[in-house]
Amino acid sequence: MPAIITHHLFGEDAAKRLPSHITFSQEELLAFLLGNQGPDPLFFCFTAPPKAILTCHEFAARMHSEKELDALLCVRDAVRSLPVADQGIGHAFALGLLAHYLLDSEAHAFIFAQEQAICDAGVGLEDAHAQVHALIESELDTWMLWSARQQTVDDAPAWADLARTERVSRVGGTLISQIAWQVFGMRIGPDRYEGCLHDYELVYRAIDPTGTRRNRLIARAERLGARYSILDALSHTNQVKEASPAANLECKPWVDALTGEEHHTSFPDVFYDTLDMWEDLVEAFEGQQDDALKELVVRRYNGSPLD
């Protein structure tokens, strides 16, 4: 990922940079911002039958690791198969999925570099990569929210970034189901997506903000079966964040663990440089310029170069 809040902030800025001929109604903007959360909600499925939970988790993992271009082309073309009345919602949702892919593919190297450095620092976190990764992303979420809006999660709770109507959820679920079947050969019913959104929202309602009695109880229960709590790591503090070590505002050097390249960029550099790439990606996606799209979709969601 980045996490839920950073993706939402990126989506808000990306919506403002769409070509002038693309205009959204209020409901279509909700669809764009929901699609902009990408496959992430499917990782949080936990109230479905066990087989469905495993399928959702596997689909989200595969979306993040293979067939990136195929999935984007599939959702773009699937919009035309929707009922005419739903195509505006579907189009916005598909563009949101595109925005999610872009930020993930460009920002992950920055996050992985910090994760690797912390876990290799000899402080006993060698087996805590997932938790450290989540902590970095939640720290960036908290700092980005204050930096962009002067708000904390008390003012703008993370779960509110999943705002949707019944139609947005239904159309989004239909498109997710189509990608799952057409690209990955997996069966996920269209209504399962709303269940994943419900679970994702429920998780953040339960764990935010960090340090509440409910948050501490959840973390304590999770630690009964594990050394660290991933849910505690995912939670956001409600503190004002004027600065953040995770954002690398001093532009200290970091190494892309996937390519070995050294960089000196901060997280705001990564965020806004990625926004500058958005318009070219949308033009290729919208204009059916598949050769140009292949030249732009060059990384996996985790930031590694495509073969």
Image (tube, rainbow, N blue to C red):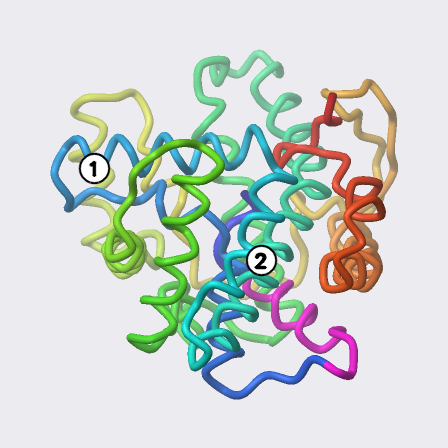
Q: Is residue 254 magenta?
A: no
Q: Could you tell me what secondary structure mostly forms the magenta stretch?
A: helix
Q: Which span is picked out in magenta? A: 6-21
Q: Is residue 13 magenta?
A: yes
Query: According to the image, label 2 marks what residue?
Result: 6
Give the total number of marks visible in the rendering. 2
Residue 276 figure quarter: bottom right
- Residue 180's spot in the image, x, y percent? 41, 41
Q: Is residue 83 left or right of residue 104?
A: left
Q: Label for residue 222?
A: none
Identify the residue shown where x is 75% and y is 83%. Answer: 21
Assign the N terminus to one quadrant of the image: top right
Identify the residue shown where x is 53% and y is 16%. Answer: 123
Q: Could you tell me the amino acid type at mark 1?
A: Ala
Q: Mark 1, residues whose alpha carbon is within 10 Å: few (<14), some, or many (≥20)?
A: some
Which label lies toward us, 2 or 1? Answer: 1
Residue 301 figure quarter: top right
- Residue 255's spot in the image, x, y percent? 79, 25
Q: How far is disc 2 from disc 1 in space, using C-alphas?
A: 28 Å
- Label located before the other in sequence (2 or 1): 2
Secondary-structure class at tag 1: helix
Identify the residue shown where x is 66% and y is 71%. Answer: 148
Q: Is residue 52 above or below residue 160?
A: above
Q: Mark 2, residues whose alpha carbon is within 10 Å: few (<14), some, or many (≥20)?
A: many
Q: Could you tell me the amino acid type at mark 2?
A: Thr
Q: Label for residue 52?
A: 1
Assign the C terminus to one quadrant of the image: top right
